[in-house]
Image (tube, grey):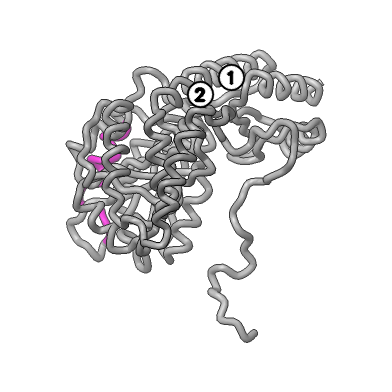
Amino acid sequence: MTIPYRPALTGLEPYGAPQLDVPVALNVNENPYAPSPALIADIAKAVSEAAATLNRYPDREFMGLREDLADYLAVESGVRLSPEQVWAANGSNEVMLHLLLAFAGPGRTVMSFSPTYSMYHEYARDTDSTWVAAPRLENFALDLDRIESAFDEHRPAIILLASPNNPTGTALTEQELRTVLEASKGRGPRDAEGADCLVVVDEAYGEFRRDGVPSALKLLADYDNLVVSRTMSKAFGAAGLRLGYFGASTEIVDQVRIVRLPYHLSAITQAAARAALDHAEEQLAQVETIREGRDAMAERLTSLGLDVAPSDANFVMFGTFPDRHRIFTELLDRGVLIREVGPVGWLRVSVGTPEENETFFAALEEVLA
């Protein structure tokens, strides 16, 4: 061997859900509705203007975008943050990587509760952090009675909590969040005695939460070790834009600024994201349609005699099947791509357009028959 491979990466494959050319793709929790002509026109105009400056580096602090994101969060969640409390990057994936680069790393532990988003483990691996995943309860809720003992045992630098959780769809209540945040006090990494754990609540699907389910942003004023991550990929229908962001204390943002690569957000990305934010009301009008589709999908899956995990996201996890791969494959044979992910026996389907949802159910009923 002449190339100095990292031993931890030996034999591994890159992350990625299947990208197949099928009539109905319901596997990666995308917003099924394309941008409106008005939004497309505004993005094109903004990008054209930004293109005239491409000989110069972009604004590395992107304060205009951070102001727009703070304005959006104030409307969506009712929480007003300063632009200095907001950070953004190329998708919430890079946001998470920034946080781990700044607060985890060799000798430190990143903790979550399984089943959860499979990329969390990879963020820990890529930053040479120790990964620990404690089990959830059978209903996919957190085992709050064991939170303190788990933190005492592992002393995590970062705790990653998806709410709504992927792939289960489970959302955390305010009391559950407060229990975790209280338990995190003073139980941070051993090399920073007395420090709190950094609690990162990943709200990638936050806009789809049910009425009465609060955003963790409401707790930022009470806990300076809390980070709330969001994305424009889902509710905004902008998965191809690659824009994720978080709200936190200015101290956390300033630490992340140390590890970010120079000029990490291109002028094109900044311009397109700001143009999309100008259409927030239009984009969020789709959210209610998707939520209604989710609830109808869950009800119909239940009527077929299947188990359905309660979901606050834009997808539904259902099962259980002795051979879920057969169900997945037979649906794919009928032109419907869903996701073989989550606990053994379960499958996950994204909410599509009404026509796509009908095609999914027609195929599923054939397979089940």
Q: Which amino acid does label 2 sit on?
A: Pro
Is the Cβ of the residue at disc 2 closer than 8 Å to that at disc 1?
A: yes
Q: Residue 310 carries which label?
A: 2
> Can residue 24 be seen at all in this image of the molecule?
yes
Characterize the local packing of mark 2: few (<14), some (14-19) or many (20 or more) Cα atoms within 10 angstroms: some
| Badge 1 element | helix
Q: In which quarter of the image is the C terminus?
A: top right
Prevailing secondary structure of the magenta residues: helix
Return the residue nearer the eye: 327 or 208. 208
Residue at x 52% of width, y 16% of height: 292
Q: What residue type is labelled 1?
A: Ala
Above or below: residue 335 compared with residue 240: above
Q: Is residue 212 left or right of residue 362?
A: left
Find disc 1 in the rendering and name its residue.
Answer: 298
Residue at x 64% of width, y 84% of height: 1
Q: Is residue 25 left or right of residue 54?
A: right
Between the residue at mark 2 and the residue at mark 1, the CA separation in whole angstroms equals 8 Å
The image quadrant of residue 153 is: bottom left
| Badge 2 element | loop
Q: Position of residue 223 (x, y in %)?
A: 20, 41
Q: Position of residue 48 (x, y in %)?
A: 46, 46
Magenta region: which residues?
176-189
Q: Does the magenta stretch include residue 187?
A: yes
The image quadrant of residue 108 is: bottom left
Above or below: residue 235 compared with residue 184: above
Characterize the local packing of mark 1: few (<14), some (14-19) or many (20 or more) Cα atoms within 10 angstroms: many
Q: Position of residue 368 (x, y in %)?
A: 78, 23
> Can residue 96 be seen at all in this image of the molecule?
no
**Which residue in the rendered view is the most extreme toward the bottom?**
2
Residue at x 69% of width, y 16% of height: 304
Q: Where is residue 274 in the image (x, y as percent from the top left)?
A: 37, 39
Q: Earlier in the sequence, mark 2 or mark 1?
A: 1
